[in-house]
Image (tube, helix red, strand yellow):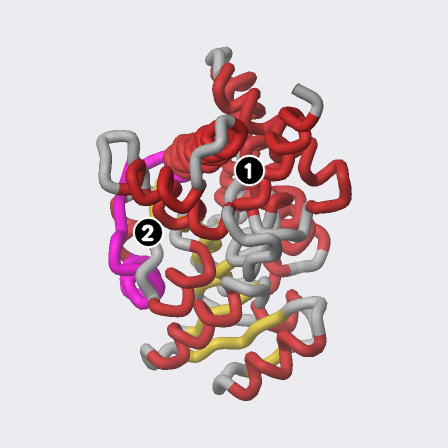
Amino acid sequence: MNIAFIGLGSMGTPMARNLISAGFSLAGFDTNPRALSVFAGNGGKPASTAAAAAAGADIALLMVVNALQAEQVLFDDGVLDALAPGGIVVLMATCPPGAVQAIATRVKKTGRSFVDAPVSGGVAGAEAATLSIMVGASNADFERSSPVLRALGDKLFHVGTEAGQGAAVKVVNQLLCGVHIAVAAEGLALASRVGIDPKVILEILGGSSASSWMLKDRGPRMLQDDPVVTSAIDIFVKDLGLVLEAGREAKAALPLAAAAYQMFLATSGRGDGAIDDSQVIRSYELLNRGV
């Protein structure tokens, strides 16, 4: 099975490497020459354009930033036309469900298949091939793409038979992740404000019913001045924006997601969009400074 891998960023590069290690033949494209160099060093075949990477491929796997980029590479840059007749487009980016449905409709009109397969697990999951993958696709397309997806993640869920259903699950996941990070920051900021040692409160909360995966993972980094970036503030500006867009599409009220979004947006607006997302706590500290 020949795969075109489009988008060799911080997650795409290890994902492509895992597919190569699993025995798949990969041609790849990214606008970053360094990413292509690393891809070649891992055994992939770098291409000069996205269309060249997709030429005759059985699967075009898109690990791009958003739906707009997916539309660009598929319909403007020639990936869809270059894909083999009967080939499969696998979209793994976090996108609004409505946008995914629209892309799927255009892909299917050409006789090709579409698999909606966003991922969760970040760079660590991409490196270790332990991603959670939420798939919206027909039963037949799910079975056809499963060997590829199982080389990328150890938690593969067929959540529905329609494009957009995988995206909907990812949106819900990102809603909870963003709110959990923001509320953990709010709690630690309150503890600090009233004079409680944040290390002590973090130890207490981590072993209590108030704990969450995000508290345990991000909490220690919230106590650092400049932690290593594992996921940037701007990722949650983007993802919580998509959550709110999905809420508008469904006419669903999402007040907690909206509040968390504003805290990430405020942090980014001060020029801190590229720092670790745990540093949303800085916005709480600034809010409380004049209290």
In magenta segment, residue 148: yes
- Residue in the image at 53% along x and 29% along y: 193
Q: Position of residue 246 (x, y in %)?
A: 52, 25
Vertical placement of residue 129 versus 268, above or below: below
Q: Which part of the image, by quadrant, shows the N terminus?
A: bottom left
Q: Secondary structure at mark 2?
A: strand
Residue 237 image position (x, y, % from top left): 62, 37
Whether the magenta-drawn stretch holds residue 290 is answered as no
Quadrant for residue 167, please give it. top left
Q: Residues within 10 Å of mark 2 (few under 14, many from 20)?
A: many
Q: Are marks 1 and 2 in contact (CB under 8 Å)?
A: no
> In x, y percent, where is residue 98?
53, 29
Q: Amino acid at mark 1?
A: Asp
Task: Report the Cα–Cα distance between label 1 and label 2.
Answer: 17 Å
Image side of residue 45 versus residue 287, left or right: left
The residue indicated by pointer 1 is 239
Q: Nearer the viewer, residue 31 or 100?
A: 31
Residue type at the position of mark 2: Ser
Magenta stretch: give its range. 144-166
Is residue 229 placed above or below 163 in the rendered structure? below
Element type at mark 1 = helix
At 56% from the left and 21% from the top, the residue drawn is 258
